[in-house]
Amino acid sequence: MTRLPRLSIFARTFLLMLCALVISAAIGFAVLVLQPPGQNSGVRVIELVSALRLDQQPIGPFGPPGTGPAPSNGPTPGSGPEPHSGPEPGMPRFMPPPVDVDISVSAQAPKGFSGYDARASSKMTKRLSSMMNVSSDALRVYIVDTTMDTMAGSSPLDAAIKGGFVIGIRQTDGLWRIASKAPETFPSVFQQELLWLFGLGLLVLLPIAWLFARTLAAPIRQFADAAERLGSDTNAPPVPRNGPREMLRAVDSFNAMQARINRMMQERTHMIGAIAHDLRTPLARLSFRLDGLPSPLGEKVEADIQEMKTMISAALDFIHDRSLGLHKQRLDFRLLVESVADDLVDVGHDVIVQPGPAITLEGDPVALRRAVVNLVENGLKYGERVRMYPRTVEHECVLEIDDDGPGIPDALQRQVFEPFFRMEASRNRGTGGIGLGLATVRAIVFDHGGTVELRNRKDGGLRVVMALPLAAG
């Protein structure tokens, strides 16, 4: 199963708040759609009856006192229920139509909306025919929405029609009096306003969510950058104290840990330097006392003593370089590599650098030059010819150093960077060295935030790949 990529705290917090905002807006809109507001409760039947009976020749029991149904509009046998003898009890004489209902008069019978509910329309036709004492032939009812509310125990006149409808009644003069209400579209005007409101709310809250996530993630990002700097430079400045209370506690602990690491490294450096320095005196006395030994024993002992002095000097130089720290500045790394090659060519070595554009990075020029010199001299010692290829790859400067030597077994390619490790078993300083050259290179490269590794070339020889970060900007 493929693992999801690990998002930063900033991304996680921002996405979480964004999802919460979208979900809350979706829930609000869903509630709006499933449960419309109270002002959209529909049109009551009593309002429709009152609006449809207001003509010049009143129809049925809703006309002036003493009038009855017109003969032309009276019910015919089998065409509907028996007419009422009088108006409905408590029926008002006049009620204005709702503002969203259109009242019109037409010579043509009304036509309904497409997709109207035939069953609900038939049911409403019978109800209006009975209440208004008119024939079903004089009514045209088209109801789009089947939802009708009637409270228990209330009069049918209190029922309400939700949605669109077209109801027409034929008057005594042959004209049709029509009450119509267009079916609501989706989204309705009210729903569109709410959608705009939700959208405006999202636009207002998104910058706030982004600012909140950025503020939360900034101290943690600074903390991570400081930890990365500590891995490459223990003398890096401490982490600034800012952020919430928990972050301040973590920063204080981190700065205290960095101070303890620096103190331990300084104590270790001083101890090793003192031991190496103090060993010179007994070695000098030992060399003086063994001066009278006969050959070849005296020569062998003197060689061992000189080798020990050389190792002590190399150890002192290594400790001294580590204790000085780095003095970084912007420099052209290609120019530095070319200057190393030129110095070696002047003394007769075969060293070539591939030409190319300038490569700018931030580093200590003395330390980087020492690292390049150690790598090139190591290649010349075993391969007699060195080719260097500096180039940029994305955000890194990569230097490849190829030689024609025998290479290094894969199992030992990491071990050769350990201090005082030598592949040459005879301990001959002319071939095996002291064992601090590659250790020094690795320390310098790591201090610059880079990497170094060895590879055996397919066509023979060894390739050293050194990668350093480019300068910002």
Image (cartoon, rainbow, N blue to C red):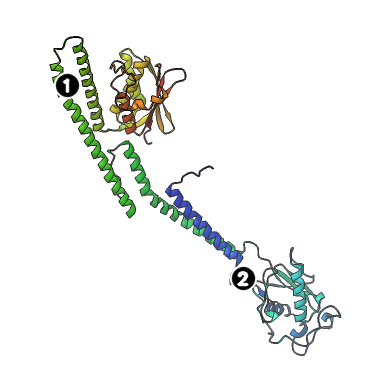
Q: Is residue 96 shown above or below 366?
A: below
Q: Position of residue 253 (x, y in %)?
A: 29, 48
> Which residue is the site of mark 2?
40
Q: Residue at x 20, y 33 (%)?
A: 271
In the image, 264 versus 397, the foreground residue is 264
Q: In the drawing, what numbered circle is on residue 193?
A: none
Question: Where does the image place residue 163, in percent across and percent down from the top left?
Answer: 67, 68
Is 402 situated left or right of 440 in this image? right
Q: Is 61 rendered above or below residue 274?
A: below
Helix, strand or loop at mark 1: helix
Residue 158 seen? yes
Q: Residues within 10 Å of mark 2 (few under 14, many from 20)?
A: few
Q: Quadrant of residue 454?
A: top left
- The CA distance from mark 2 to mark 1 is 105 Å
Q: Give the image location of residue 167, x and y in percent.
A: 74, 72
Q: Is residue 403 above or below residue 363?
A: above
Q: Nearer the viewer, residue 219 or 427?
A: 427
Q: Which mark is residue 283?
A: 1
Give whichever of 135, 287 is nearer the camera. 287
Q: Nearer the viewer, residue 458 or 82?
A: 458
Packing grade of label 1 (10 A; few <14, some 14-19, many >=20) is some
Mark 2 / mark 1, whichever is N-terminal: 2
Quadrant in the rendering for residue 188? bottom right
- Amino acid carrying label 2: it is Asn
Tag 2–tag 1 contact (CB < 8 Å) = no
Of the 4 image quadrants, the one containing the N terminus is top right
For discs 2 and 1, the disc positioned in front in the rendered view: 1
Q: Tell me what residue is drawn at x 82 percent, y 80 percent.
A: 73
- Horizontally, is 361 left or right of 185 in the view? left
Vertical placement of residue 245 versus 264, above or below:
below
Looking at the image, which residue sits at the far right? 77
What is the three-letter code of the residue carrying label 1? Leu
